[in-house]
Amino acid sequence: MSAKLTKLRTQFTKDHGKGTLTSWNKVVDLPRFAFPLPKLNHIFGGGVPLGRLIQLFGKESGGKSTVANAIAGAFQAAGKTILHLEPECSFDPVFTKRTCNYDVTDEDSVIFSQEQNINKCYNMMKDAAKNGIDLILCDSIDALVAPSMEEQEATDSQMGIKARAHANQLPVLTGFMQKSGTVVIYISQIRYKIGVAPGSNPETTSGGEAIRFFSSLRGRVVRKSWITKGSEDSPIGLEMLIKM
């Protein structure tokens, strides 16, 4: 080992504290939480990577929340802890328990909030990650509201406020996640860009570029067809495609 590097390592540790440097002298696989569902495990490359951000996106009623709630149900069944942020205020606990085996009424494993203020939500997420909560779920980031937007009309000058909030807060949040192993799942909608050149893809996802940059996995969830029994007007489920 180089004497210069040894000296620098010692100096960095002394000046900046233990844990500043990361050693890769023992390469190990990225720790993951494996699901009891083989197909879901395969899609996620062997399970959800711990300490990472996952973005699930797609059109409305495509199954994004169902996938996220199924993941939360698997975490809960394994005795893990969950912070569930639901700013959309459209959650159905009875339906979710029946379809995803996820019980948000179990306060021993779940903290549930329908707070919409983006800064308050990020503060809760950072506190949860610092305290070792296993899973944080936000459904959806589209429903988060910046403080300056709560009492103002929607104008062009407001469009970048939430994107800046994500860009400012995500570097801090991901640092806490990496240390604690907390998994964060963001659900977002597909949006369409204005003035796109012919032949270009007009689709984008909400929240700005920071979410895409910090996401270790991004999954597009698409509803393929409804599963019906008897009358086609009474669907009992849906078949979906998840593309990572």
Image: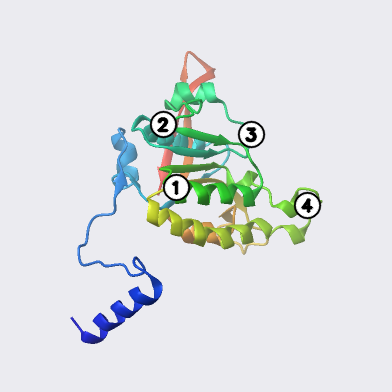
Labelled pair 4, 1 in contact (Cβ < 8 Å): no
Residue 3 placed where, x, y %?
21, 85
Q: Is 17 rendered above or below residue 27?
A: below
- Which mark identifies residue 154? 4
User: What SS does tag 4 mark?
Assistant: loop
Q: Amino acid at mark 2?
A: Gly
* Residue at screen point 29% across, 50% down: 31
Could you tell me which residue is drawn at 62 percent across and 58 percent down? 165
Mark 1 vs mark 3, foreground winner is: 1
Work out how far the residue at label 2 is from the one at label 3, CA to CA, in angstroms.
Answer: 19 Å
Q: Is tag 2's residue or tag 3's residue first in the polypeptide sequence? A: 2
Cα distance between the residues tagged 4 and 1: 36 Å
Which residue is rendered at x = 54% and y = 17% of the image?
Answer: 234
Residue tagged 2:
73
The residue sitting at the bottom extreme is 4
Residue that carries the numbered disc 3 in the rendered image: 89
Foreground pick, 109 / 137: 109
* Residue type (three-letter) at the residue carrying disc 1: Asn
Q: Earlier in the sequence, mark 1 or mark 3?
A: 3
Residue 239, percent from left and from top:
43, 31
Q: Nearer the viewer, mark 2 or mark 1?
A: 1
Amino acid type, label 3: Cys
Residue 47, horizontal then vertical, whole percent? 32, 44
Q: Secondary structure at mark 2?
A: helix
* Mark earlier in primary sequence (2, 4): 2
Sooner in the amino-acid sequence: mark 4 or mark 1: 1
Mark 2: few/some/many CA within 10 Å (<14, 14-19, 20+): many
How many residues crowd around disc 1 within 10 Å: few (fewer than 14), some, or many (20 or more)? Answer: few
Q: Which residue is mark 1?
A: 131
For marks 4 and 3, give the one nearer the viewer: 3
